Structures are given as structure tokens and as C-alpha cells.
Image: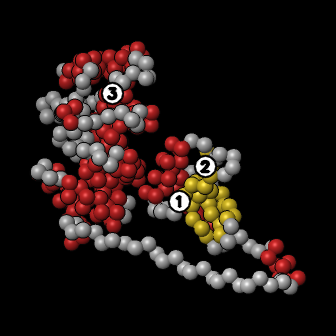
């Protein structure tokens, strides 16, 4: 959400609704003010201690609005922010992100999800939400906040290099916001001298030169027979096969947060998008990776041969 539409929802210095859980370490100026008078009325009810009435008002509003109405994502966002519990908050905020990614409320919803996941002890999901905000909304004024919460998630996951990279970006963008700069600087201390100076450029690993093509010869019968039964060049683990780009995108982001940087998408002639991990030299290596993925992700990942 942009510009003057941000304000603080407070009563006696306390954040209201489920946002108590979500924003115990919030940016002090980032809770969203509403433009629609019906939603402003809901917030006034919350501020007067009538949260149940506020939730009922928002539910009635959502029931009367068409999903295509521009107010609908704003109402969903409000419903998430005043939800009675974390699960309800996450559901409403996730709908804003998935169904209304074009709306000016989507980046706010992603930031709230990152904070909510972190507060619930799920640093991987917090980092995932932050990375999605960074990727999908690179010009958002909330990007530095996403950097901060993503970094905290990565630190909890013991991914110090990625955490420090995001902390550096957050510190660079902190500007004159002294409170936010102090928060970021506290975590930047763990990065030593790596924060505050440009990160060194990393070069991709060199690609080994391909072997020269031998001149054509007439292969001996035995050699020809052996090529027919040659082993596959590599094995991978297939995690998902769907036609939904949204599902694929979310899984790829989660896999990369979990450390599977080589996760990729393979499209076949049937139109399915297949998410695969790794290129392992032996089936045994791939099977070990399969077990790790099943333990961490669930589902039924399986080993596939690749040329």
C-alpha cells in the first residue's frame, strides 16, 4: 500500500486485534489506514474496544461486495488485521496476496505475513514471504522492512550470508528513520564488517569445457550395444507436477529458502509444470535427497532419471 494510506492503529499505545501477535516488533508507522468509510468505521469500533462488532461489520461488507470491487482486497486486508487469531489473519492476508496481487494492499499483506510467521516461530515461511515481496514488488516502500524480517528469518535458519545480505540492504534503505535504523543496526552487529560495505560480487562456477567431438567412425558392434544400455546422465527428485503457476512459484520460493538453490521447473508436452531438485550422479544419492525432502516438505517426492 502506498503513501498517505499508512497510519497506526493504536489505543493507549497498544496494537489492536491479532496484530498484537503480529507486530510486537512492528515498524511503528506501517499499519494501514483505510480510505473506505465503512472500514474506517470498523477501525473505530476496534479502537473503542468493540473488536467483535468490527469483525462482524467487515464480514457483512465482504458478503455484499463483488470480488471484483476495488474495495474487496482492502476489506480482506482489514479482516486479516483485526482477526481474532493468527490462523484467520493468515488466511485473509494470503488471499490478498494470491487473489489480488495487483492491488496496492498486496505488499502490505506480504509484510504482515512475514511478521506473523516469524512471531509464530516459522522463520522459513517468514523468509519466504519477505523474498516474495522483494521479488514481486521491488519498488515497494516496504521493501526495506521485508529485508529486515527476511534477515531475521534467515538468521534463525542459520543462513548467515543471506541474512547479512538482507540486513545490509535494509540498513542502506533506512534513511532518516532512526528507530528503524537502530533496529537494523542491532542485527547488523552479528555480521561484523560485512555490513555497510558493498557485498563482493560472486562469479558463477566455471562451466567445464565440453569434450571435442570425435570424427565419425563406424562403431564396433560391442560399443554400439553398450550405448543402448548406457545409464542416465543424472537423477533428480520430482516434488510437484501441476498446471498452476501460483503453486509452482510458491514451492520454488520455499525450496530456495530451505537451501535448494538448484530447484527448477521442467515443462512437458502435456502442459504440466514439474518442480525438480538436484542432479545426482547415482540413484542412491537421489533417494537420500528424496527422503530429506519428504521429511521436510511432506507429500510424495520421487526419483526421476534425466538425460
Look at the numbered disc 2 and give the secondary structure of its residue.
Answer: strand
What is the distance, in whole Å, between disc 2 and disc 1 at their CAs? 13 Å
Label 2: how many Cα within 10 Å (few below 14, some 14–19, many 20+): many
Q: Are marks 1 and 3 in contact (CB under 8 Å)?
A: no
Whichever of callouts 3 and 2 sits on the residue coming sooner in the sequence is 3
Q: Quadrant of residue 199?
A: bottom left
Label 3: how many Cα within 10 Å (few below 14, some 14–19, many 20+): many
What is the distance, in whole Å, between disc 1 and disc 3 at their CAs? 34 Å
Residue depicted at x 27% and y 17%: 38
> What's the image's color scheme?
secondary structure
Above or below 120: residue 232: below
Please state, as top left, top right, bottom left or bottom right, where the C terminus lies in the image.
Answer: bottom right
Camera-side residue of 67 and 43: 67
Q: Position of residue 88 (x, y in %)?
A: 40, 32
Q: Position of residue 3 (x, y in %)?
A: 21, 36
Labels 2, 1: front one: 2
Q: Which mark is residue 263?
A: 1
Q: Are marks 2 and 1 in contact (CB under 8 Å)?
A: no
- Residue highlighted by disc 2: 273
What is the distance, in whole Å, between disc 3 and disc 2 at their CAs? 32 Å
Q: Which mark is residue 296?
A: none
Amino acid at each position: 500500500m502506498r503513501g498517505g494510506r499508512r497510519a497506526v492503529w493504536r489505543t493507549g499505545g497498544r496494537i489492536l486485534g491479532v496484530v498484537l501477535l503480529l507486530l510486537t516488533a512492528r515498524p511503528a508507522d506501517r499499519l494501514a489506514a483505510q480510505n473506505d468509510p465503512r472500514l474506517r468505521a470498523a477501525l473505530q469500533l476496534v479502537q473503542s474496544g468493540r473488536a467483535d462488532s468490527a469483525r462482524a461489520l467487515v464480514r457483512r461488507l465482504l458478503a455484499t461486495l463483488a470480488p471484483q470491487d476495488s474495495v474487496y482486497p482492502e476489506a480482506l486486508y482489514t479482516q486479516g488485521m483485526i482477526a481474532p487469531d493468527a490462523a484467520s489473519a493468515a488466511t485473509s492476508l494470503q488471499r490478498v496476496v494470491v487473489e489480488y496481487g495487483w492491488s496496492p494492499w498486496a505488499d502490505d499483506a506480504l509484510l504482515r505475513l512475514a511478521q506473523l510467521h516469524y512471531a509464530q516461530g516459522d522463520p522459513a515461511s517468514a523468509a519466504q514471504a519477505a523474498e516474495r515481496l522483494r521479488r514481486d514488488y521491488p519498488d515497494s516502500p516496504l521493501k526495506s522492512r521485508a529485508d529486515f524480517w527476511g534477515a531475521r528469518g534467515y538468521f534463525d535458519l542459520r543462513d548467515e550470508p543471506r541474512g547479512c545480505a538482507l540486513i545490509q540492504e535494509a540498513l542502506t534503505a533506512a534513511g532518516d528513520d532512526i528507530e528503524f535504523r537502530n533496529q537494523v543496526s542491532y542485527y547488523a552487529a552479528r555480521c561484523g564488517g560485512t555490513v555497510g560495505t558493498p557485498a563482493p560480487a560472486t562469479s558463477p562456477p566455471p562451466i567445464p569445457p565440453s569434450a571435442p567431438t570425435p570424427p565419425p567412425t563406424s562403431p564396433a558392434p560391442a560399443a554400439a550395444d553398450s550405448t543402448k544400455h548406457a545409464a542416465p546422465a543424472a537423477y533428480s527428485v520430482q516434488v510437484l507436477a501441476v498446471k498452476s503457476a501460483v503453486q509452482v512459484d510458491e514451492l520454488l520460493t520455499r525450496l530456495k529458502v530451505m537451501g535448494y538453490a538448484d530447484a527448477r521447473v521442467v515443462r512437458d508436452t502435456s502442459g504440466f509444470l514439474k518442480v525438480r531438485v538436484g542432479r545426482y550422479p547415482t540413484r542412491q544419492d537421489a533417494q537420500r535427497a528424496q527422503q530429506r525432502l519428504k521429511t521436510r516438505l511432506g507429500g510424495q517426492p520421487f526419483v526421476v532419471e534425466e538425460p
